[in-house]
Amino acid sequence: MKARTRTNLWFQLALVLTLGTLMAWGPAVPVQAQDVVVKVGNIIPLSGPSASVGLQGKQAREMAVEEINAAGGIQSLGGAKLVMLYADSESKPEKGVAEAERLINTEKVHVLTGCWNSAVTYPVTAVAERYGIPFIVPVSVADKITEQGFKNVFRIAAKDSWWTRDQFAFLKDLQEEFGTKVSKLAFVYENGDWGKGFAEQWKKLAAEQGYEVVLDEPYPSTATDLSPVVQKIRRARPDVLMLVSNAADAILLTNTLAEYKVNLKAVITSGGGHADPSFLKAAGENARYLFDIVEWETDINKPGAQEANAKYKAKYGQNLTGEAVDAYLAMYVLADALERAGSLDPAKIREALAATNYRSGPGMIVGYDAVEFDETGQNEHASLVMVQINDLGQGLERITVWPKGARRAGYTPVFPMPAR
Amino acid sequence: MTRRHYNKMAAAIVLILAFGLPLVVRSATYLHILVLLYFYAYLTTSWNLVGGFAGVLPLGHAAFVGIGAYTSTILYLQYGISPWIGMLVGGVLASFVGVLIGLPTFKMRGAYFALATLAFAEGIRVMVENIDRLGPFVLNGPRGLQIPPLKLGLGNLVFASKEPYYYIILLMLLAVLALTWVIARSKLGYYLNAGGEEPDAAMALGVNVARSKLTAMAMSSFLTALAGAFYAQFTLYIHPKSVISLDLSFEIAFIALIGGRGSIAGPVLGALLLRPVSDFSRIYFGDTLPGLHLVIFGVVLILVMIFQPRGLQEPLTRAYNRLLDRLAPGQTKELGT
Amino acid sequence: MLFLIEDAINGILMGSIYGLTALGLTVIFGVLKVINFAHGSLLMVSMYAAYWTVALTGWHPYLALVIVAPAMFVFGYYLQDIVIKPIFKAEQDVREPITVIIVTTGVWYILDNLTLLLFGPQYRTLQDNPLRGRMLEIGQMLISVPKLWGFAAAVLTASGLYLFFQKTRLGRAVRATSLDRQAASLMGINQYKVYNIAFGIGTATAGIAAVTLVPFYNVFPTVGVLFDIKGFIIVVLGGLGSIGGALLGGIIIGLIESVGPQFMTATWTEAIVYGLFLLVLFVKPSGLFGVRYDW
């Protein structure tokens, strides 16, 4: 009896390690030598709770890369084409890191992009830094990402301290424009990296600018019933409600706020769930008059923007979102850097990215004028716009209202919201 | 040659292979996958002390991974204490918590025990997500903790390459396998087995079932926490949803059942099957058919359970014994010595 | 004070819907002695079924019940027959069918991700249904109408199940099997057929829950997970296998979730729910309303 078990042990160990070896030798991806290609590894959530936003990022990248390749690829590299490799992070840091290792070591990508979830982006920046692979972050808002002293991280989108700063600037301008005073704020946010980061900044800004915070409420994103939170908002009687939500809870909150007839002067949201294309469909009329902060809107007054959106919509059946546009732009910024680098050496690409000054071109459909990275890798020009959701007779749409220079011609924002 | 020789030879080959692997596998990708494979095999082997031998189904071991990871990371980041020491502190803390949770739950059976451990782990996750700082310790709530990969070296358990991690987790795995092997042969092992299968009969024979289960729980949670600290140093970032997740608890149980719980090599076999299935299906299908890799994972799980409800170790052991019978026939008697 | 009453009412209504989602779990456990980890996914599948029925036919959302409940019964019946039964047969001599738990988890992964593959990650709601956003106003109090109907559905379903198990021949056969499967098969009851039926009934109640949820809730591939863990807690609180217990367990959770946030941040109520759950387990493992079994 005793020895039998021992036999098993030895045998099993042998088996284990042989299999391990086989597995490690098993699949190896052949690299084509004849054509020069630029391999771009993209780590985004394609399954799991953030799959919806991951899919948009993927589609936007695809569209940009098709355009770049159709226009002749990277000239300085002999017309090299961009080859996209996508990896699913499932919104899990562990999977993101494993995929980054694989993309860098096995697929030998020249550049990485991703990862939307800040929690995945952090550890992946460390991997990219270790191998010296340039890592373009279209969107992951946490300040910390570009504040780690890493040399290979480049973020296109604004960081969360800028998002919140602009939300408050907008609130101030709104009060001046309409002569309505706002004094009481309520902060309600998902209890995660993103929501907590925003709320921290909000509290600081509210204290500086003399607002009274009547409610500061994190809630779990997985909540099945948000009416208790809505009741709290209703009873706190804020003038303005500020939200950070993922898609499922954004829909639930918006509907519940309408059901309980909560009267507010304004609701200011923070993109994410509120910018998800399915949000407008699912919340419908209840989403009317909401102000959302985004980096881009379909009605933006930029050459090429309408066309890009029309093309995207024809292809994928929904409007481009701010986050998708960042991914779209990221591909053009990359193409521009590659053009200048004239090399596939990651260090050269990094140099070129650091020297980026991208001001015009097909990717420049965003609200700001240029992409230039500061020494931390943050795009200095990233800026944001506020939109209002309203129905002007053609169904609900998102209308740019701030900064005033970017406001859609002839539109006057609705503030305060009409009573429900 | 006798069977014993063959066994020793097999073991030697296995060890040489395991230790030599990084010399052949130069790709960090595969080393990374192997490190995680060993990590899961280690976790499941630790889990097996309770889930296998004691005959219950714990579904909350991620709580101990979390305790280990958080303890060592906090001590390292805030006090500069080496993760090796933090690892042990986390282990002690985890075994304390393990006993605390084991005391009332071991009276339960089956479904209740599974659900109690599951709820306990989820409760810990919710707590950590709600606490930004606990006294002097910064937990950072849902935002997690990041370890800057600046000070490299064995003392800090941070390395630039995968090889050191590979050897550390391999040694940890071998150690825990050896420990399991010793326990399985000890009085404790017999008590656990008896208590798991027929608790009433065992108690009637004077076996202190509750106490041996608690001992197993303390060891299991201690060992699990060590891996948690290793994990934190390996990925350099932890947050509640990654180290205290339900998915992690479940995956440990999956691996154990697929490999064959209660056997020594079952966990390793389970990890060898399930980890590559999950990694490679994600790699090949993750971009084009999102979600398909988890469908495949589920299908593999169900198929193995339908056709080999005792896990993979059973048929494989039989095959190996048959092979030995052919190589060294008629020597079965010698084995007893 | 009025606030508290309003919150308590919402808690009871929402909680009874939680109870309704968990009823199937308790029925299946009561008979098969297995925690069905795929229950949330079955709820999700039912929600998609209800959503598409209403979206394609334009019926009143509650009318979808006539399609969804029978369809889910059949689905559950064959799921048990094809996927779970073989394991019961292989594990006949084992006291606790732990492997079955793992198999139901496999079913969960498959269903959730197949849905993602087929329908994509989008969130869907029934836009123009007559129940959407309907509120009952009593003075200053607001009560959600679809939740009120959900409460009624929960009470009716629970009573219906109770009567079925107590009064009908088939129900008694199911109960007999749950008490002693060997003895029941000796008495000529086909054990596995009873399992199929119990699983079918459990899945059909998930269908009923889905129909009451769809008019005011989002439908997406991972929606089941949100209700899954809640369901486990509810059935243990109420006593695994107890039908009335599931309803009351749900209401307790609903009350904590609804009244709790008025005294603390909403995220802490989750912790209270887990704390209460563990407390009940330690003090009275058979649950608040359960019978003491040896398992």
Image (tube, coloured by chain):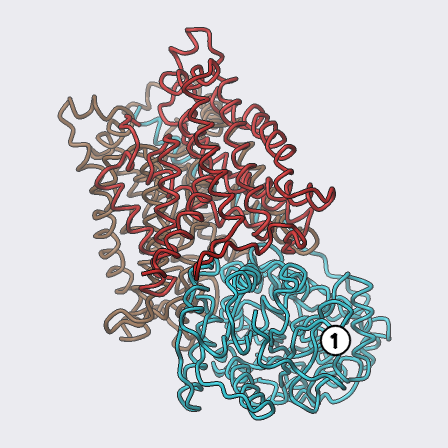
* Quarter of image, res B265: top left
Can you say which quadrant of the picture contains the C terminus of chain B? top left
State which chain disc 1 sits on: A
Q: What hue represents chain A?
A: cyan
Q: Position of residue B56 (x, y in %)?
A: 32, 35
How would you rate the neighbour count of disc 1 (Cα within 10 Å): few for under 14, some for 14-19, many for 20 or more?
Answer: many
The residue under the point 52% across, 65% down is: A261
The single residue placed furthest to the front in the displayed view is C139
The residue beneath circle 1 is: A298
Does A153 appear above or below B48? below
The single residue placed furthest to the left in the displayed view is B206
* Quarter of image, res C284: top left
Residue A101 visible somewhere in the drawing: no
Q: What hue represents chain C?
A: red
Foreground: B263 or A388? A388
Secondary structure found at label 1: loop
Does B228 appear above or below A330? above
Q: Position of residue C146 (x, y in %)?
A: 54, 48
In the picture, one chain is brown; tell me its letter: B
Does C288 appear above or below A220? above
Does B82 appear above or below A334? above
Foreground: C111 or B189? C111
Q: Position of residue C138 (x, y in %)?
A: 45, 56
The single residue placed furthest to the right in the displayed view is A71
